[in-house]
Amino acid sequence: MRIRVVAPVVATPLVQMVFEQYRAAARPDTEMSLATLDKGPPSIESRYDEALAVPDVIAKVARAELDGMDAVIIDCMGDPGLEAAREKVSIPVIGPAETSMHIAAMLAHRFSVVTVLDTLIPAFDHHALKTGLTSRMASVRTVGIPVLELHDHSRLLEALLNQSVRAVTDDGAHLLILGCTGMAGMVHGLVVGLQRHGITDVPVIDPTVLAVKMAEALVDLQLVHSKRTYPLPPEKEIRGY
Amino acid sequence: MRIRVVAPVVATPLVQMVFEQYRAAARPDTEMSLATLDKGPPSIESRYDEALAVPDVIAKVARAELDGMDAVIIDCMGDPGLEAAREKVSIPVIGPAETSMHIAAMLAHRFSVVTVLDTLIPAFDHHALKTGLTSRMASVRTVGIPVLELHDHSRLLEALLNQSVRAVTDDGAHLLILGCTGMAGMVHGLVVGLQRHGITDVPVIDPTVLAVKMAEALVDLQLVHSKRTYPLPPEKEIRGY
Amino acid sequence: MRIRVVAPVVATPLVQMVFEQYRAAARPDTEMSLATLDKGPPSIESRYDEALAVPDVIAKVARAELDGMDAVIIDCMGDPGLEAAREKVSIPVIGPAETSMHIAAMLAHRFSVVTVLDTLIPAFDHHALKTGLTSRMASVRTVGIPVLELHDHSRLLEALLNQSVRAVTDDGAHLLILGCTGMAGMVHGLVVGLQRHGITDVPVIDPTVLAVKMAEALVDLQLVHSKRTYPLPPEKEIRGY
Amino acid sequence: MRIRVVAPVVATPLVQMVFEQYRAAARPDTEMSLATLDKGPPSIESRYDEALAVPDVIAKVARAELDGMDAVIIDCMGDPGLEAAREKVSIPVIGPAETSMHIAAMLAHRFSVVTVLDTLIPAFDHHALKTGLTSRMASVRTVGIPVLELHDHSRLLEALLNQSVRAVTDDGAHLLILGCTGMAGMVHGLVVGLQRHGITDVPVIDPTVLAVKMAEALVDLQLVHSKRTYPLPPEKEIRGY
Amino acid sequence: MRIRVVAPVVATPLVQMVFEQYRAAARPDTEMSLATLDKGPPSIESRYDEALAVPDVIAKVARAELDGMDAVIIDCMGDPGLEAAREKVSIPVIGPAETSMHIAAMLAHRFSVVTVLDTLIPAFDHHALKTGLTSRMASVRTVGIPVLELHDHSRLLEALLNQSVRAVTDDGAHLLILGCTGMAGMVHGLVVGLQRHGITDVPVIDPTVLAVKMAEALVDLQLVHSKRTYPLPPEKEIRGY
Amino acid sequence: MRIRVVAPVVATPLVQMVFEQYRAAARPDTEMSLATLDKGPPSIESRYDEALAVPDVIAKVARAELDGMDAVIIDCMGDPGLEAAREKVSIPVIGPAETSMHIAAMLAHRFSVVTVLDTLIPAFDHHALKTGLTSRMASVRTVGIPVLELHDHSRLLEALLNQSVRAVTDDGAHLLILGCTGMAGMVHGLVVGLQRHGITDVPVIDPTVLAVKMAEALVDLQLVHSKRTYPLPPEKEIRGY
């Protein structure tokens, strides 16, 4: 099977690093490829960034279908363009945030999200509202590190661990979700750190690898989003696109 | 005061017609102007249309602030780009859908929305969820007329009236919201039609004129959206914009 | 246009002071008048106070309609008698609490109310429940000053500021609502105080001036509450009234 | 034990008839008494009626405490004055609507209320919202008979049965609540009628007799409403009362 | 009337002690009896314990009906087997948790539960969700004492008081529910302790005695759970039972 | 990898037939095995059936862990014993109902469940409540065929198709879930049937094959339910087990 990761940003070293995590999670017979944007921001840290990424995200998702991909993953915890892209294609389009929250709700009573910046908190509250999981989200915590500085893994790990311990201890989280796909690959270090704090019963979801498994599962099942919910947009000329 | 209407579509006769409704609703001392998109669709009938309209909507809203406008109205019941645009500027940005639903909830126990096409129903359910008004929305009904055919007013009125009567009688609506700004100006005909069916106690909200009044009120009050909710996006180069 | 403010209390100096705020907020062509109760309490600090105010509130609202008023504002954040009064008349009746919460929800992700006494917290929780905005209300905080001592503005401002800072910092409020119409006129001082604490991105709603703008807007729009939700009460003799 | 029924209306033959139902439900050692209003409406069919009844309801509840009553029942499915009256006294005050809905939710997956007039539907939706039981209320149906015509038992029974059958068959009700205390005594006839329609598994709650049992239970348990929720109102002069 | 308490555990001294509380709460003409399990755990501290208790709980409830009991109380705040048992019989089956929460919601704006162990918190959140009372439950607090050590009343009282004060002061509880039937009889000591902390306006519900009163009330009213919600299970051979 | 299907019933031909569906869905390198109960009912059609199945379900799940299984699927849309079993083991335990609903919510705006008997409707409402997806479930419809008669595939298909068309047309479902694992294998026929009715845009979830994919995904991800939500039950002697 062939899965395309669409990063909603222009090419950056971080995107490539994160893509290696996606690739490592795939089954041997799953072929992974990466698309980055021609037009868009270098990182997504606001709804404004998101809005300017979306048109090319949709184009890249449509391209993936034309290229014969079996599924697409949008590489961002804002799930930018998820719904519009699903209208445009008939292959599964996976949003890591949506997927992580639903799976978290299956595995634990309450979960927390640890993301990058305070400005993203309303977006996660919105994800929770849309999925129906508001009462299951114990908290949204932030490490206070901009996306493009996430490559400093020791700084990131320390901040992640600090916030994760507080999510468990103060907010009652029973499971943690990494709140930015740029945090891919941090699960092992975080779990070890939590153990040093005596926390051994709290799973951590890395949305990137989860998204790969969800994509593989849907393709195996020949399940796609409902085209009654996401109908093909009416044909019309759209100026400038 | 100066209010800019940003139509999230390229210039069409319908947009101009609707703008006359906005202008007619303004106070004598309110100067209304219209901006249409350079890049974008001729009408909004899907989340795909919306996504491709948003980047230029934001640009036009930002332009409005530079032009010294006091407030902006996004001329579409999808409120496309509302949140991203609010991040970008510090003048009020009005979404007609959001505004109509909140005011409807103040005036009636339950309201119905009568919009154009079935494919928009999830979007209105989403508006209701975000505003917290799910239990107050009696139904979303549709006239089955594409946006660009709305200029046929006698066909539109007949369909609107038919669906409105059913919203009141079958769904228990106590107030009606016109579900597309392209229906601007239909309130009088609809109210008269409802009266012929013996329905004299159900107000109808025209979101265009309501949006003008809300914009004027916020400007008078010097009230703007919270910049803690909608902070200025971090400065960064966005390729292609 | 003519707007009547109905204070749900007997005449007091505070009521007159607050009325000046209402008057100052009106457009030049809006004529404001004040009615106080013949029968009722000097302040509203309990549901008991509210209950004993309501019959004369209704009478004063009905009187306003007979006097040719275009709209009525009930001058209290308990919105006492709002629904019963709307049944009785066919002009808009504005509740400052209901209005403030809906507008706050349009402008910010989460808002807090800062009111007078702890005993009013359940009432604001109830407002939030009725409007559907429970998840949008970050907190209800109180200054611990009885209504009739609110005229001591320096004491009030200090307590307001203290609670407002905590609402923003500890509770995550992105917008503040003054929780008693007796606090009218405190916005400027509070905003300046917040700035000294480094908080410059949190709007403050003064429900009195907002109520005037909402009344003007509804009158301009010829929009009234649904008489299907608030039908004229059946004619009957009511002993003692 | 001594229980006072406070009818929120002036004395009418119907009130006396209903009181006999309350009395018949009491334990042999429970002494029942009835108070009617000196000031107020002859029936409660609107929020306006309710608002004008409340001041004297509170007075009668306060009187009951002075008279040494152990508990009070407010004889109306609007529960008029329930919260204000609880502030004033330290003996249990029972609202038949609130009580019926909570007990219904314990006994059945979904319940319907069959009440008198369409104008009361928002009030029952509001009860459901306040109790948290919105999703448990299958429907509110109405017999279309004003309160003061409820004494025509054969007409009432036919309408009740008709609506009850539809609540069960069309709306999925598993339990029925009589939606007006003026329907007291109709359970037997209704159950027999339902059996003739083959419906033998749907309990019917008569709120009057249930209220008596709840009052007796609370008195036995020495349980009263929380005075932290319903604190004694601050002492103040209230003009006209 | 005859009420059977079914303890979902094998016979222990604690069960007998708690039964004395049930018996003391009954009316003189109510005959109380106790059944303990032949198969099951000595205490309920997990969903696993609960699951293994349930088959014999159902058998004991069915036995109670055959023995001519008028109602059954399941003696545990997990309400184990409540729904399955109700299917099997046509006499009222009372769950102390469900009953306490509904009555608490009638008496106070917000309540807290103080139970034994942290592992039970999700179960109480689930009770709140099922009853619809999530927003009314201020907190679930725990004394950290296993069920079988509850007989040490001075240790229990100290921990209960400590957590109760925090529930009121920090969490905003207006009423407290003892969160384990093994805490029966602690109300008096707890109320006295709260008074020493200046808390005199917060009622405490002992679910055991409340359950007795609810059982008596339902029997008096001839009200039973809806057999449409809890239909008799289809006849079938169940191997091993 | 090795996955054990635990059927919560004693061995029947239907169970074996359904197991073939599970096996067919597995990846080539996934080894599937089946366990049926020694003690329990032949089918699950009530909460009573479920309660009597659960103890041996837990035993069989515990046995699966001892046998070195990587994950367990409980073969029933009631998810019987899911939570108790998760406490007992540290391998993933999959509930087909919980899984189907979360995945359905990711793929469509609203879904309907088509199950066997009306008596199961409250159970599905309860699943929806627990998952937070109440507003996403358009309806629960039933074919009126007991579990043990499901092997009559032509009768089943006709009834399934009939109810599915109504779910889509009348209830607004955008996706369908087969509401009993005994319906495994019916997707193809149902999809073809829907096409004959002109419905080509509504996916159908077969919970059995979905459960296999979810199990495989979790094992691949080394993700297990949170042991903070499902802690190992305290060690204690449980009589009779």
Image (cartoon, coloured by chain):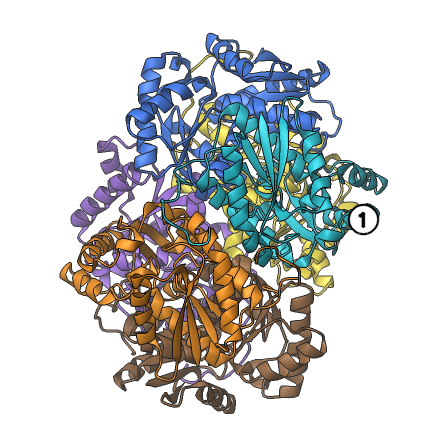
Chain colours: A brown, B purple, C yellow, D blue, E cyan, F orange
Q: Quadrant of residue D177?
A: top left
Question: Which quadrant is home to the C terminus of chain D?
Answer: top right
Q: Determine the chain carrying the residue at label 1.
A: E
E216 left or right of C106?
Answer: right
Q: Is residue B28 visible?
A: no
F148 left or right of E38?
Answer: left
Q: Horizontal and vertical percent for residue D118?
A: 37, 28
Q: How many marks?
A: 1
Q: Horizontal and vertical percent for residue D94?
A: 59, 26
Q: Secondary structure at mark 1?
A: loop
Q: Label 1, on which residue?
A: E152
Up the image or down, A90 lies above or below C177; here it is below
Q: Quadrant of residue D204?
A: top left
Task: Identify which residue is drawn at 37% across, 43% down.
Answer: B111
Residue farthest left in this picture: F196
Q: Is residue F234 visible?
A: yes
Up the image or down, D58 lies above or below E75; here it is above
C105 left or right of F32?
Answer: right
Task: Identify which residue is drawn at 38% across, 25% down.
Answer: D117
